[in-house]
């Protein structure tokens, strides 16, 4: 899973609206109808020109993490955008997209849409979290900052719902490490049951799952562009958000104004190649973390760091560590480690967590794992994991060739030895093999003729979306590459002055940096 570090949302399953809101006077609600703007596809006029009802965001946040992210903020406002469940049936069922806005302070160019990746992460929470740094840039005067939760996610209704909170807690303790024939069979049975739960637990069932992909998200984003009154799109996409931006450029090239794609998903790699590349990226980041850890002293990883890490974590397979009324599992320890490797800012917490584990404690590692899986202190999870699977299963080609799967598993273990659990490589079919709807995603290198040059940002030490992925994406889109030399996953609007200056200038006046520009 690739994502930006952010606090995310969870919303209970509710019925979607079936008619567009025309709006009547209502305390605390501001109705606006600046659209339609720009190109409007035939048959979708009522969506592209709909009235938006902006209000306080508290009602859009129902968990501790979402309230912390934006529910108590007074300088943002929220609304729901109505879109077709199935764009081939615009007169059929509708769903809603949660949208958050921080309004520009000066002469406005338009709206700047943000997507943090995942897939499954909340754009509303991310935008709210960016406000403080955003206000320090020239963007604050020129663009409304817009975060939206893609369909089926967060405040968008209905949400994809597969497992309850207690079921997710139990799943974290179910390791599925057995790669014997019996173990593979058991894992596949669980994955099949999971897919069935997703269809059964989600409003509109298979119809919702069939229309959860990037193909549909970019159509929602174009409706949002128009409803906000923008003739063309300005957008920042992080991680998987680069895939959204790329597909938008392919689908609506005439509507592109300026896109920043930061932490690119490689368009030339299939799922297996991407998995192995990511393993190499995390191993490289782990090696860098070990250097940091040893430089700081009291590092629990001595000698061969890979072996030392395994020596610390493998005992959790047989005996999880008690943390209050919960337990730190082996899976949790690995999840926590990967979470921390996303950014060197989290490395001190990982060092602390490993020191605690050496002493038989698991508090910090469990907190890091909870952060990755977006579990709040009350035991509530956002739907990020379920949404990730729902999007992945319709975006990417199904992998059912077990020989090919086994080869990828072998390469993965070789590429990231610190993650080796000691079992032989296995080849269990994942939930997507049992998904009840077909794949709808594009395949192959993207082609977006007629778009203006875009800005692609790639970080040399990015573990989740390795540097070469950005190089390849910039080349395929005939766009400009900005290289950041650092140890983190994505970088724009995260306090790196060199990168922010270049990105802000590009978004405001569409001026690209010189070819070969690097920031450190």
Image (cartoon, helix red, strand yellow):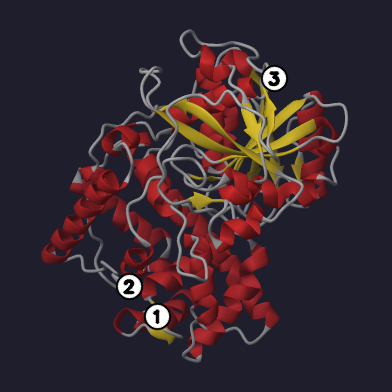
Element type at marker 3?
A: loop
Which is in the foreground here, disc 2 or disc 3?
3
Residue drawn at (55%, 22%) of the image: 223
Q: Do the residues labelled 2 and 3 touch (CB within 8 Å)?
A: no
Residue reaching furthest to the top:
42
Residue drawn at (35%, 45%) of the image: 272
Residue drawn at (21%, 69%) of the image: 178
Whether residue 248 is visible, yes or no, is yes
Residue at numbered disc 2: 173
Q: Does residue 232 lie above or below 466 as drawn?
A: above
Residue reaching furthest to the bottom:
359
Q: Do the residues labelled 2 and 1 touch (CB within 8 Å)?
A: yes
Labels 2 and 3: the sequence-earlier one:
3
- In screen coordinates, is 320 left or right of 97? left
Q: Which mark is residue 352?
A: none
Element type at marker 2?
A: helix
Residue at numbered disc 3: 34
Element type at marker 1?
A: strand
Labels 1 and 3: the sequence-earlier one:
3
Residue at numbered disc 1: 327
The picture places residue 175, in percent across and down from the top left corner, at 29, 69
Q: Does residue 28 lie above or below 168 as drawn?
A: above
The picture places residue 107, in percent across and down from the top left corner, at 87, 26
The crowding category of the residue bearing disc 1, from other C-alpha atoms within 10 Å (few below 14, some 14 to 19, many at least 20), is some
How far separated are the C-alphas under marks 2 and 1?
A: 8 Å
How far separated are the C-alphas under marks 2 and 3?
A: 50 Å
Nearer-the-camera pick, 67 or 499: 67
Labels 2 and 1: the sequence-earlier one:
2
């Amino acid at each position: 899973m690739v994502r930006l570090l952010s606090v995310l949302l969870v919303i209970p399953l509710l019925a979607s609206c079936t008619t567009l809101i025309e709006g009547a006077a209502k305390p605390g609600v501001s109705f606006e109808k600046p659209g339609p703007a720009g190109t409007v596809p035939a048959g979708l006029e009522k969506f592209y020109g709909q009235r938006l009802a902006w209000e306080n965001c508290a009602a859009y946040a129902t968990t501790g993490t979402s309230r912390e992210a934006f529910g108590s903020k007074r300088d943002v406002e929220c609304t729901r955008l109505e879109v077709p469940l199935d764009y081939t049936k615009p007169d059929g069922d509708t769903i809603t997209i949660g949208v958050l806005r921080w309004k520009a302070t000066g002469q406005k160019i338009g709206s700047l849409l943000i997507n943090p990746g995942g897939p499954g992460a909340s754009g509303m929470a991310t935008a709210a979290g960016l406000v403080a740094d955003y206000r320090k840039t020239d963007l604050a005067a020129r663009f409304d900052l817009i975060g939206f939760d893609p369909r089926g996610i967060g405040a968008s209704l209905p949400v994809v719902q597969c497992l309850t909170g207690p079921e997710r807690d139990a799943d974290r303790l179910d390791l599925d490490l057995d790669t014997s024939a019996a173990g593979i069979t058991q894992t596949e049975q669980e994955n099949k049951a999971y897919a069935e739960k997703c269809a059964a637990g989600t409003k509109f069932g298979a119809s919702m799952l069939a229309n959860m992909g990037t193909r549909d998200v970019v159509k929602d984003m174009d409706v949002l562009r128009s409803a906000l009154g923008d003739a063309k799109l300005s957008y920042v996409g992080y991680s998987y958000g680069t895939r959204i931006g790329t597909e938008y450029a392919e689908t609506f090239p005439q509507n592109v104004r300026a896109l920043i794609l930061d932490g690119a998903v490689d368009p030339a790699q299939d799922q297996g190649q991407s998995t192995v590349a990511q393993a190499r990226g995390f191993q490289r980041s782990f090696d860098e973390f070990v250097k940091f850890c040893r430089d700081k002293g009291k590092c629990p990883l001595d000698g061969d760091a890979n072996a030392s890490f395994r020596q610390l974590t493998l005992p959790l397979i047989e005996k999880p560590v008690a943390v209050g009324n919960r337990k730190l599992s082996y899976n949790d320890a690995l999840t926590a480690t990967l979470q921390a490797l996303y950014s060197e800012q989290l490395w001190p917490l990982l060092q602390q967590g490993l020191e605690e584990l050496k002493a038989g404690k698991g508090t910090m590692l469990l907190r890091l794992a909870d952060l990755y899986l977006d579990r709040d202190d009350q035991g509530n999870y956002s739907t990020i994991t379920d949404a990730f699977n729902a999007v992945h299963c319709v975006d990417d080609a199904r992998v059912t060739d077990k020989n090919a799967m086994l080869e990828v598993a072998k390469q993965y273990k070789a590429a990231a030895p610190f993650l080796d659990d000691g079992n032989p490589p296995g080849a269990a079919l994942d939930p997507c093999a049992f998904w009840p709807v077909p794949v709808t995603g594009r395949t192959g290198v993207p082609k977006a003729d007629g778009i203006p040059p875009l800005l692609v940002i790639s970080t040399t030490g990015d573990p989740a979306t390795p540097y070469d992925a950005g190089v390849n994406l910039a080349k395929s889109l005939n766009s400009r590459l900005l290289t950041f030399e650092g140890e983190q996953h994505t970088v724009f609007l995260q306090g790196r002055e060199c990168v922010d200056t270049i990105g802000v200038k590009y978004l405001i006046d569409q001026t690209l940096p010189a070819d070969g520009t690097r920031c450190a």
